[in-house]
Structures are given as C-alpha cells and as structure tokens.
Image (tube, coloured by chain):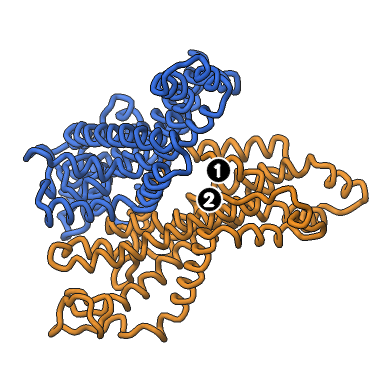
Chain colours: A orange, B blue
Amino acid sequence: MSIVIAPADPAAEPQPGRSLWKDAWFRLKKNRLAMFGLWTMLLLIGLSILTPWIAPYGYETQDLALGAAPPSLSHWLGTDTLGRDLLTRLLYGGRVSLLVGFAATAVSLVVGVLWGTIAGYVGGVVDALMMRIVDMLYALPFMIFVILLMVVFGQSFVLLFLAIGLVEWLTMARIVRGQVQSLSRQEFISAAVVMGLSDSQIIKRHVVPNVLGPVMVYITLTIPAVMLFEAFLSFLGLGVQPPQSSWGVLIANGVETMEEYPWLLIFPGIALSVTLFALNFLGDGLRDALDPKSVEQNRIE
Amino acid sequence: MSKLALYRLIQGIPVLLVVVTVTFFLIRAAPGGPFDAERTLPPEVVKNLEQRYNLDAPVAEQFFDYLGNLLRGDFGPSFRYPNRSVNELIASGLPITFELALYAILVAVIIGLAVGMLASIKPNSLQDYLPMSLAMIGICMPAFLLGPVLVLVFGIWLEWLPVSGWGYSPGDKILPAVTLGFAYAAYIARLTRGGMLEVLNQDFIRTARAKGLSTRRILFKHALRGGLSPVVAFLGPAIAGLLTGSFVVETIFQIPGLGRFYVQAAFNRDYTMIMGTTILLSCLIVLLNILSDLIAAWMNPRIRGAR
C-alpha cells in the first residue's frame, strides 16, 4: 500500500485551500488497490439493491429434474441439489451478508461514537469510569458471548446484527474518545471557547469533522469483520436461518456436497473472499489517505 | 515484574466474575427449561430432575451454589447426557483442543517467521511480494473456507491426506493444524517482516555489518530479537483466537475436542455444558492475555514502566 510522496516540486505540492477531504480523495485515487476495493464495494451494493430485478431466476424456483448441474449458459454458476440457480442464491445471500455487515456496523457506530464522545468530552471521573468499563469488556471473549446470546434468545436476524454490533463498539469508543480528548487540548478549540462558542457549536463545527476521518476508516474495517463473523456463525448453523440465506450458509451447504458438486462451495467462497479482500484494501487505503502521517509507518508494516 | 504480574492477575478477577455472572443469568433467562422439549413429564419426575439440577432453589441461592461449586472445580451434571458431568466432557475434549492449538501455533510460528524473514531480507522484490500476497490471501480467507478447500484438494482430489478424524490414521492431524494455523502464519509473517525491517534500518545493525559479521549472524542474533516483539504481543490474543477457531476446525474435521462440544451444546441447548465451557474458555482467554502482556513486558523493558 505504498503511496508515492510527491517530490519537493512546488507545482505538485497540495495547493493551499484544498480541504482535508479533497486531499484525501486525491491520495485515495492514486492507490490502485484501494480503488479496486471501492469499485468492488459499489458494485456489490448496486447488485444487492437491484437483486430482485436482475436475478435470472426466482429465489425459491426449483428444477428437480435438472438437479445439481455444473455451470452452463442457462445457469452461469450452476445449480444446487434442488436445481436452484446458484447465481440467484448468491445474489440474495449477498444481500443478507451485506445487510448484516452494514446494520451491525451502524449499531457499533452509534453506541461507540456516543460512548467515546461523552467520555472524551466530559472527562474526569466519568471518563475514567466509562473507559474502565470498556477495558473490562475488552477482556471478555466476545465471540463466545455472541454465540451464547444467539442460543439464549433464538436465532433471529435482528438479534444477530444487534449482538455483533454490541460487540464491535468497544474499539470505536476508544478511537473516538482518544480523538476527542486530544482535540479538546488543541489550541483552536481553546480559541473557540474563548470566542464564546457554545458546546454544541464547538462539537458540530470543530470536533465532529476532525473525528470523522478515523471513524470512517474504522467503519470500513468493521464491515468486513462483521461479515466474516456472520459467515462464521452461519457456517456453524448458529447465524442466519433458512429460508433466509447468506454466503456463510451457502458455504456450509456447499461443504456438504463438495465432493460431487464442488462449484457449490467454490463460488460462494470466492464471493466472500473477494468481498473481504476488497473491503480490507479499501480500509487500508482510506487510512493512508486520511492520515498521511501513518503512511511511513504502514510502509514498514 | 512480579508486581506487574500480581496487578494484572488481580485485574483479571472482576472480569472473570462478570463472565460467570452474565453467563449464569443469561442462561437462566433463556426461554424454556432443559427438559420440556420432548414430552410432558409427570410432576414428581420434574421435581426430581429439578432437585438434581438444583433448579428448585431461589435463583440467588442457585447462583451462589454454582459459584461455590465452580471454586471447587465442579461444573455440575450435563443436561443432555444425564450420566456424564460437564467435567468429564471437558476433560475428554480439552486435551484434544490443546493439542490441536499447539500444532496450529507451531505451523503459524514456523511458517510465519520463515516467510516474514525471507521477505524482509529483500524488501520490495519478488521474494517480498509473492509471499506477502499469499499472506494477504491467508488473512482474508476464513478457516471455514480454507478447511473445506484443503480437504477437497489434498483429501479428495489428490488423496494425500485423510479428510477427517483425529489420531485414527497417520497424517490426519496435518490438515486441521494447517487450517487453524494458516491465518496466524499470515499475520505473523506480516508482523515479522515489519518488525525486522524496522530493526534492520537501525544503526546497531549497520555497526554489526561494518564489524564484518555474517548476514546470518546479524539476522538471527541481532535483528530477530527486536523484530520478534510485535509477534510476541500478537501471540496471546492469537491463542485466544485459536481456541474459538477450534469451533470451526473441529466441526469440519469431526475432531472430538472442546470446540465441537461447545457447538453441539449450543445446538442441543445443553445449558450446563454451555455454561461450563463458556466459563472455562473465558478463564483461559483472560489468563492467556495476561500471560502475553507479561511476556511482552519481560521482552521489552520500556513497557514495564507504563501502568
């Protein structure tokens, strides 16, 4: 993930007045892997939204006479044992996987940002207490607790992303709190206070825009983590339940028949891997783009 | 150093208490009793069962009883297998899971260190890019996908290795260990490469070179020690991850370890078994994290001062 740092040529220097975001976009565009990640992501979101219109067959449409058939012109990715079109199932499954990814990340975003902002902004005893709670929760083995929650409260779709989201907010809270705290010590915040801005004005105008960058990076890295976790749970049979399907469920089903019909394992596997790949690259690229200081370090890593 | 150890251990106690409490009350909140699944039982049978599982006492008393039993190392009887205690199930599964985790760590550390060092010797060359791209694939490919693919290729198509089992035929431990260890090998390779590159740029390495030491001596004697510290910091959480990773690997390869028991208990709603394994795994993970912190402090004196 190397970014070429412009030589000391004055024409190539970022022009004064270019905003942080434009600057970041400029850097991101140069990172080919990150752009590949971005386009893959946009393509997936587009496909997920359009699934009901573009899916070549119905989700439940069976063709028992056909059975499991390898990829062909009429079924591009083949069919499963009930003669259902794999491409269609993959599109619908991807919808569920993406939805869980986004919804759980949204939950973690809301909880984490609120928690971190309050702790960082109020400071003092409140901060110490809130962050000790985060420390303690960090030490818990959460994967086990999500499984426990799924077992106790039944495997509902809403619970799935709530449980995962409630696990993922801890890091978000830490990042936001750290940012808010370091910001509140900076001179431009003191200046704003001296100028008589209200708390809400300061938060809106100065704190939020500065926290947004790291939060966005973390979001793009959380989504693949959540999707992976969902697939893991579904693979074990503890996540998404039939008739609903996700890539994890498709992989689990594919494993059962991989000896005879390997394409039922291979295509869902490729879909999941490529998505995780793309999102991780996008997250790395965003981090480099939004925080150029970290680039040197990342180059070593 | 011992002060730090003591401090960290004391910090671990409330965490474990939270684990036990949350687990206990979550399970109690679960809808449906353990034995109302099949058919209605005569009241006296229910009463006997409740007595056996200590469910007729007030919840608070049940909780403290359970805590007391835990302190004595007794996880109680299993709901599903009435003739077996959770202790017996754990005792039969835990050694297998440990063995699997040990092999996986060996795979991860040996492959990871070798690949990472190889890549760091000639950064930004083919020798660097090729293994590092492979490592990226390793990180992105989850074990529940890698496992079946390995089985398909090496077990079914090439017929080199057995596809499942544990200790029944020679070589049946290879695929599970590789499946579990591969992602960690990839991480360790990345960490090693990063750590080594950082150290190799420092002055004392240049001095060592100027002194005329051989490359091998510089790499293994001088650079590796410094380059290893991120790897050690990673190992503790990694071992915790291996324990949860064993859920998937033991399910795929049908290994009778703790992970498979846990997943089955979750399916069967074997509440005492879930409770026992959750608490046990949590304790292990908390302890391992403390241990890795201590090793990191021992290796890097600068961390000792903090906290």
Image position, residue A66 (x, y; %)? 15, 83
Name the residue that disc number 1 marks.
A299
Q: Tags 1 and 2 in contact by the CB under 8 Å rule?
A: yes
At x 44%, y 44%, the residue is B125
Res A100 → quadrant: bottom left
Three-letter amino acid code at disc 1? Arg
Between residue B143 and residue A43, name the one nearer to us: A43
Between residue A100 and residue B206, name the one nearer to us: B206
Subunit that carries the residue with mark 1: A
For residue B280, side relative to residue B95 (left or right): right
For residue B24, side relative to residue B13 (left or right): left
At x 17%, y 62%, the residue is A256
Secondary structure beneath label 1: helix
Name the residue that disc number 2 marks.
A1
Q: Is residue B26 visible?
A: no
For residue A285, side relative to residue B228 (left or right): right
Between residue B128 and residue B30, name the one nearer to us: B128
Subunit that carries the residue with mark 2: A
Res A110 → quadrant: bottom right
Between residue A114 and residue B98, name the one nearer to us: B98
The CA span between labels 1 and 2 is 7 Å
- Specify few, some or many for label 2: CA neighbours under 10 Å numbering under 14, 14-19, or 20 or more: some
User: What is the total number of numbered labels drawn onto the structure image?
Assistant: 2
